[in-house]
Image (cartoon, helix red, strand yellow):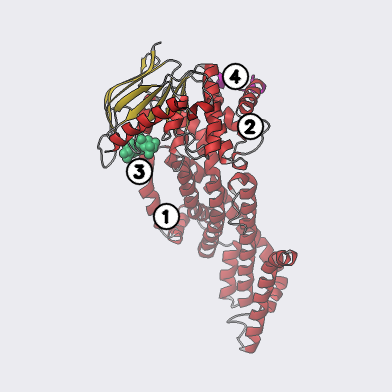
Amino acid sequence: MNRTNLLIKASPWLFTIGLFVVWEAAVYIFKIPVFFLPPPTAIAQAFVDYSGPLARNSWITLQTTLIGFALAVGFGMLLGLLVGWSRAMYAGLYPLMIGFNAIPKVALVPILVLWFGIGFVPAVLTAFLISFFPIVVNVATGLATIEPELEDVLKALGASKLDIMRKVGIPRTLPYFFGSLKVAITLAFVGSVISESVASNYGIGNLMLQAQAQFQVPLIFAGLVVLAIEGIAMYAAMAILERRMTGWAQRSGFAQA
Amino acid sequence: MSAFVTLEGVDHAYAGANSALAVEGLSISVNQGEFAAVVGPSGCGKSTLMKLATGLQFPRAGTVTVAGEKVTKPVKIAGMAFQAPTLLPWRTTLDNLLLPLEIVEPYRSQMRSRKVEFAARARNLLTSVGLRDQGEKFPWELSGGMQQRTSLCRALIHEPQLLMLDEPFGALDAFTREELWCVIRDLQAASKITVILVTHDLREAVFLADRVFVMSQRPGRIVVERKIDLPRPRDLEVTFTSAFTDIVHELRSHIVKARQ
Ligand SMILES: Nc1ncnc2c1ncn2[C@@H]1O[C@H](COP(=O)(O)OP(=O)(O)OP(=O)(O)O)[C@@H](O)[C@H]1O
Ligand SMILES: [Mg+2]
């Protein structure tokens, strides 16, 4: 029992290390050229050689992403509450939102550049635009699925719509909301990196684009690794937040098993 | 005794694709302080009757009167409990009980100043249904029967004039159910509150009620009204007497007829 537990704890690390070992071995065995697929050791070397630019640009990307994400959380929650509040709102806004969501956000970057110039602002806005949708949908779903019996109990006490929203709607929406944050933060990274690589002079996206132009393939991969690490860290932060805030909704052993 | 809840010639259909009537020509009158039970085949409109009487649905024809006033909005004086306990999983049992007080005036505006007193009242109520010291637990830490008791307490905490119970014991085992019959019996005897109980269980109806109403197949209306004059206070033993079983049999034959 104890041994399996230990194995489960260690397995993410074992698998990650295993992946790098296989990768390294494959590059040597098949004599893959560095400019095609650099081995992990070359990527590590790139981390050492370019630690300054990598640190600076990853910090910028993280900031951009978090600001866009924060905007998405605020706006997404408001819009979700609005859409969940009234059927007319839902009927009117939903098709618009679905249409908007279907637009590839990279197609919006030129417009954002036209309005705000290249750099920080379009990247933040792209992160925002790409990540608010799942928040809206989840908040609205949480509100729309209030048990009618519970609503009846409250209405028969003379509760107003606002009462029902405050006492039941919002609390029961929180698990949906925090669940959506995990999706949204990952999307926000996608948005900021897209915009950085198309229209910015900063950030990991831009760094990777420049590295590609100069054929510094290990540096491109180092950029990818940085993005993966930031993505995992933020996802984990959201998952911890979710567990903290909505422990009552995580009773089932299903996800833990 | 005066009529407290009255439905007169009520027709009702739910909005939606098939707008066939759910109840038709439904008339029923329940007196102040009376314990009424409604039985009938599944889908005949019993829950609809509850919703009409509490202003959660409005009739297509006919009138609904509660406490002397025509019902045009949710009534505010009713406590309700359903087959499912519908407790809020993010609140402790005690906080679940306090929910109605956070909504109904005058308690609502006194919530801050009288919080301790209200919590004490909630604890007393829990004790009276055998849930002493369970207030700090979350609903999902309680058994189904305990949740149902909590749900009953929630329906009573604000001392409503009207208690609406829609198959509140349906999901419980026979022993727990009989225990809760006694709980309800005592609560009603103590507070003289008007109760309307919907149930599938004829023994439950006869044991608890002053009058039992039998509804017809959909579209529902009252086909039989049976006064139960077994003396009160009633002990569970009464359910084994022949007078009791005779009434149950009689009602049963009415339902069998109603189902045809
Ligand atoms: N929300 C609703 N929308 C549309 N039709 C409904 C709705 N609720 C009930 N009905 C219909 O109205 C009729 C009466 O339903 P109701 O829930 O009052 O029955 P019931 O007597 O409580 O049944 P049961 O004993 O099974 O609980 C049913 O035929 C049902 O199909
Ligand atoms: Mg029903």
Residue A101: give its label.
1
Q: Quadrant of residue B27?
A: top left
A210, B38: nearer the viewer = B38
- Amino acid marked by disc 4: Gln
Report in which chain the residue with disc 2 lies: B
What whole-number distance in Å separates the C-alpha atoms at marks 4 and 2? Answer: 26 Å
Distance between the alpha carbons at the discs numbered 2 and 1: 51 Å
Q: Secondary structure at mark 1?
A: helix
The label nearer to you, 4 versus 1, is 4
| Residue B58, visible in the rendered structure | yes
Q: Is residue A8 above or below residue B124?
A: below
Task: Give the chain of mark 4.
Answer: B
Residue linked to disc 2: B131
In three-dimensional space, the C-alpha distance between marks 3 and 2, rounded to whole angstroms, equals: 45 Å
Label 1 marks a residue whose chain is A
Q: Earlier in the sequence, mark 3 or mark 1?
A: 3
Badge 3 and badge 1 in a common chain: yes
Q: Is residue B112 magenta?
A: yes
State the residue in front, A67 or A136: A136
Ligand 1's quadrant: top left
Tell me: residue A217, above or below residue B9: below
Q: Residue at x 62, y 57 (%)?
A: A256
Image quarter where the C terminus of chain B lies is top left
Point out residue A49 in the picture as x, y percentages from the top left corner.
71, 73
Which amino acid does the dot numbered 3 rest on? Ala
> For the residue carrying disc 4, how many other residues have a C-alpha within 10 Å: few (<14), some (14-19), or many (20+)?
few
Q: Which residues are magenta?
A: B104-116
**Disc 3 secondary structure class:** helix
Q: Give the amino acid at mark 2.
A: Leu
